[in-house]
Amino acid sequence: MDAVGTGMTAASAPGKVILMGEHAVVFGRPAIALAIDLRLRCSVRPSSSPTLNGQPMDDRAGPYLSTVLREHHTGGPLAIEITSDLPAGSGLGSSAAVTVAALGALSASRDGIDQEDIARKAFDIESTVQGRASPIDTSISSHGGGIFISSKETDGLLWEISRDTRRWFVHECRTPQMTLVVGFTGNKAPTGPLVAKVRRYAERSGFARDIIDEIGALTQEGRARLDAGDVEALGRLLTKNHNLLAILGVSTPALQKLVDAALPYSYGAKLTGAGGGGSMLALTDRPEKVAEAIKARGGTPFIVRTGAEGVRAEQGTDRRSGPIEHHIREK
Ligand code: PMV
């Protein structure tokens, strides 16, 4: 969307939580991700020299934005503005959101925003930057709402993405409007070593492989409970999913403390994403109470709503003060 007469185009993209199935998804089991109402906005306009939030671009762009520009921008210098509601480094998908929103802002000036096209390009970029990414974060940030990702096609296929021998089917996952409280532990462990730790465990232990199968079955059931809008049953599945992740060795005392603090006021609670730090989430109809309990245990709570729209064109972005490097360097 070209802000009249300025040549400026802008787009925004949501952050995400992984509701169920993290880690097991690496072994071909399904996962569910939901878009949340914390967004990242990006605007671009032609300029005499490249800038990011009013400062010379130099090395400030971070790997995701630089790769987007290198691979998807052929014109002259751009003035780019990025603002974000997403807490940096908390595992809520800010690197995917910056990639998706920047691709959205660039394509809004050309042919309009196509969610599938952006999901594919954004996955290529995350793969370039991270090595072995899965398309969960980029697909949910592009599509919004909820997605069910699996190695087999089921109902509601949105798109199929493959890379070397790996193949993912990304499906629509119908989701009621829900309130979640995310509790950030304050430290984000990088995803790669945690994935490697679970892989080692699974390679040497049939017990670990059974746990992974069980997470897959719970996630499948989670999709049905979401579809039925049964939040109480869904909450119980979340807590079971957390306990299985803890057995796999990716929870930490800090995460467990926040899960335990949230549970008395929640339908269910679990770590979300890779674990080893990062964040947990709770499904609740008493968000203020849960947020208070998380804070009392040293976590940083964010009350979020599900059902957020995917990448969309915006009129423009307001520059806000404060450094944005964290948002574009996460992972
Ligand atoms: O750290 P996050 O939120 O990007 O989640 C990682 C999820 C894993 O299943 C552990 C890894 C993956 O690529 O799916």
Image (tube, helix red, strand yellow):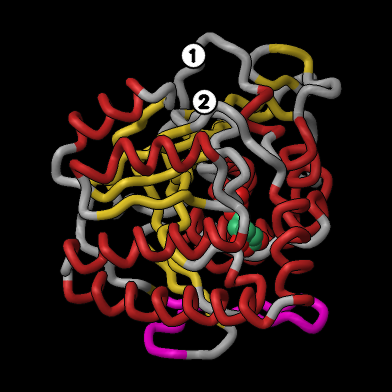
Q: Nearer the viewer, residue 178 or 47?
A: 178
Q: Is residue 97 left or right of residue 52?
A: left
Relative vertical location of residue 107 with respect to residue 102 in this rendering, above or below: below
* Label 1 crowd bin: few (<14), some (14–19), many (20+), radius 10 Å: few
**Circle 2: residue type:** Thr
Q: Position of residue 81 (x, y in %)?
A: 59, 25
Q: Which stretch did the figure color magenta? A: 154-171
Q: Which residue is mark 2?
A: 83
What secondary structure is found at the residue carrying circle 1? loop
Q: Is mark 1 within 8 Å of ligand 1?
A: no
Tell me the tag on residue 49: none
Please identify the quadrant where the C terminus is shown. top right
Q: Position of residue 217 (x, y in %)?
A: 43, 82
The reply to whether residue 191 is in sight is yes
Disc nearer the start of the sequence (2/1): 2
Q: Residue at image x 73%, y 80%?
A: 166
Q: Residue at image x 63%, y 42%?
A: 95
Badges 2 and 1: C-beta atoms under 8 Å apart?
yes
Q: Where on the picture, by quarter, is residue 64?
A: top right
- Name the outermost residue toward the top: 321
Tally of numbered tags = 2
The reply to whether residue 106 is in sight is no
Relative vertical location of residue 178 with respect to residue 85 in this rendering, above or below: below
Real-space Cα distance between discs 2 and 1?
7 Å
Q: Position of residue 93 (x, y in %)?
A: 55, 45
Q: Which residue is mark 1?
A: 320
Q: Is residue 156 magenta?
A: yes
Q: Where on the picture, by quarter, is residue 314?
A: top left
Relative vertical location of residue 204 with respect to residue 271 in this rendering, above or below: below
